[in-house]
Image: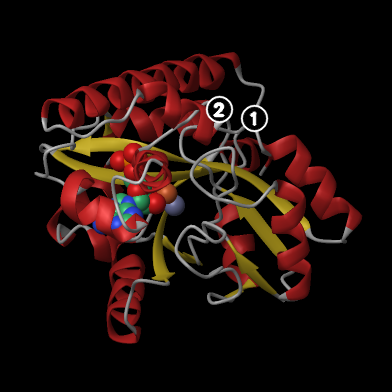
Amino acid sequence: MVADLHLHTFFSDGTYSPEELAGHAAAQALSAVALTDHDSVEGCPRMAAACAARGIEFIPGAELTAELNGREFHILGYWMDVRSPLLQERLTGFQAARRQRIVEMVERLNRRGVALRAEQVFELSNCSAPGRPHVARALVAAGCCSSYDDAFDRYLKKGRPGWVPKAAMPAAPTIELIHAAGGVAVLAHPGLYRADEMIPTLAAAGLDGLECWHTRHSVTSSESYARVAERLGLVPTGGSDCHGMAKGEPLIGRIRLPYDRVTALKSRCPASAVAA
Ligand code: AMP
Ligand code: FE
Ligand code: FE
Ligand code: ZN
C-alpha cells in the first residue's frame, strides 16, 4: 500500500478537478492521497467523495505559507477539521492577501509596459487562492509571454519586475493553527529552500513531519532528509506535488510513500494523542 501526500487541484494552482485527480490516483494504484491546495480546503469535500467512490483513503489537507527569519517555507497541514471556524477565518485572510498581491503584481507589470489586467488573472484562475501560476498563465493567454516558464523567468521569479513578496504568517503560529484545527504539520519540500539549518527550529516549534520524498529532491537528498527526520523525531513523508498539467506533465504516482508512514503521521494528530 502506497500514498501520495502532496497534490493540488484547480481550487488553487493545479489544473485537475478533484474528480480527475482521484481518477489519476486510482490509475496509479494509490491507496491513500492527501489534497494540499495552497491556502484552501475547498476541494476537500469533492475529493473525499471522489476518493470514496474509488476505494481510496482520503486525507484532507492544505499547503500554508509560513515565514521564519525572513524566508518563506511551505507547511502542509493534514487531518485538520476543514470546518474549523479558526481555520476558515485564517484561510479567508490568506486568500484576500493573495488577491491583493495579484493586483500589486499586475500594477508592477503595467509599469513595465505589460498590458495585463487583474481581472484577466481572476477570470482565468476562477478560484479563491490565486497565485503566480495564474498570473503566468494569464500572461501567456494575453500573448505577453511565450510560455509558463518564460513568464516566471522574465517577470514572476523572486526579484523579477512582477514579483511581490508574499505576506506570510510566522512559522510557529502556522504550526499552532494546524494543531488547533486538529491536524499535523509537515515541512514541504525542504530541498527547495537551502535552509536546512532552520529545520531544528521548526521541529522545536512543534513540526510533526518532514517531506523527505518529493519530485524535486534527488535520491541522495531524500535519503539525507530521512536521516534528518530520524534525528529530530519527525515522521518522514513524501508527495509528488502534482499540479495536473501545470508543470507540463502530471506528477502523481512519481512518489509512492509506504503506507506505514501515513499511520505514523496520523498517530501524531492531537485528537489521537487525547484518545491514546
Ligand atoms: P505563489 O504562492 O503565488 O508565490 O506561487 C508559488 C507557486 O508557483 C508554487 O507552488 C509553484 O506551483 C509555482 N512556481 C514557483 N516558482 C516557479 C518557477 N520558477 N517556475 C514555475 N513555477 C513556479
Ligand atoms: Fe503550487
Ligand atoms: Fe510548495
Ligand atoms: Zn505544493
Q: Position of residue 39 (x, y in %)?
A: 47, 33
Q: Give how far apart the Cα atoms at labels 1 and 2 are.
A: 6 Å
Numbered badge on residue 81: 1
**Left or right: where 177 falls relative to 59:** left
**Left or right: where 240 falls relative to 73:** right
Question: In terms of secondary structure, where does tag 2 sit?
Answer: loop
Q: Position of residue 227 (x, y in %)?
A: 31, 76
In the image, what residue occupies the spot 38% across and 40% down? 142
Numbered badge on residue 181: 2
In-front residue for pair 247/221:
247
Q: Position of residue 188 (x, y in %)?
A: 38, 55
Question: In terms of secondary structure, where does tag 1 sit?
Answer: loop
**Does the CB distance between marks 1 and 2 fall below 8 Å?**
yes
In the image, what residue occupies the spot 69% across and 38% down? 44
What type is the residue that disc 1 sits on?
Answer: Asp
In-front residue for pair 166/108:
108
**Left or right: where 219 falls relative to 24:** left
Q: How is the image coloured?
A: secondary structure
